[in-house]
Image (tube, rainbow, N blue to C red):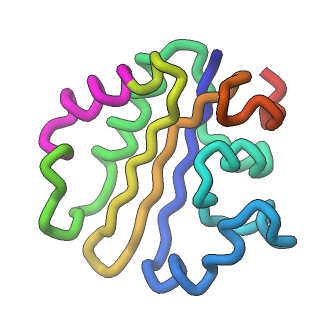
Amino acid sequence: MHWHGYVWQGDGKDVLPSDATKRSNHPMFAGAGQLPYVVNHTLMKPRSFVKGTWLKVNPAAQWLVNEHAQLPPKMYPVPDWASTPEERALDAVERLKSGRSVVWSFWLNGARYVDMRVVCCSPTDFNDDIPCPTGV
């Protein structure tokens, strides 16, 4: 089992109007910048979308924490689960260990939106028919 990291950040007004391109059956899905609704379909995006690949859980979770730390201020209210980097990392580690993916999405000040993911890439109940985008 291994994991791939993805991130998309953009103008919030682009989130809903480009809704169709977030579906894997849309002809422009592969090239659309936004990440798909179905998390395991993120593995169907081109290799260039992959921001990192990890063979161990802790570095994958730490990548999410580091990406989150670089974000501009989030809109309020901040969700209760987003209290500390340590708690976010522990939650991510537990989810990743169990073969699940982790998605952190936030509205940012200035009506911007960010979608960060670490997607489990190996045969699972969710993605056994999707090939690895990097060939790991």
Q: Residue at x 39, y 49 (%)?
A: 104
Say above or below: 47 vs 124: below
Q: Quadrant where the N terminus lies?
A: top right
Q: Quadrant where the C terminus lies?
A: top right
Is the stretch drawn in magenta largely helix, strand or loop? Answer: helix
Say above or below: 77 vs 61: below
Q: Is 107 part of what is drawn in magenta?
A: no
Q: Position of residue 71 (x, y in %)?
A: 32, 55
Q: Residue lying at the far front in this picture: please name it.
A: 125
Q: Residue at x 33, y 49 (%)?
A: 70
Count all numbered tags in the image, as a single digit: 0
Q: Position of residue 62 (x, y in %)?
A: 38, 27
Q: Residue at x 59, y 48 (%)?
A: 39
Q: 119 left or right of 60?
A: right
Say above or below: 132 vs 48: above
Q: Position of residue 89 (x, y in %)?
A: 29, 28
Q: In this rendered view, identify the residue nearer to me: 84 or 21.
A: 21
Q: 81 left or right of 36?
A: left
* First to last magenta residue range: 82-94
Q: Position of residue 2 (x, y in %)?
A: 63, 20
Q: Residue lying at the far right in this picture: please name it.
A: 27
Q: 78 left or right of 68?
A: left
Residue 59 image-quadrant placement: top left
Q: Is 92 part of what is drawn in magenta?
A: yes
Residue 135 image-quadrant placement: top right
Residue 83 image-quadrant placement: top left
Q: 136 left or right of 80?
A: right
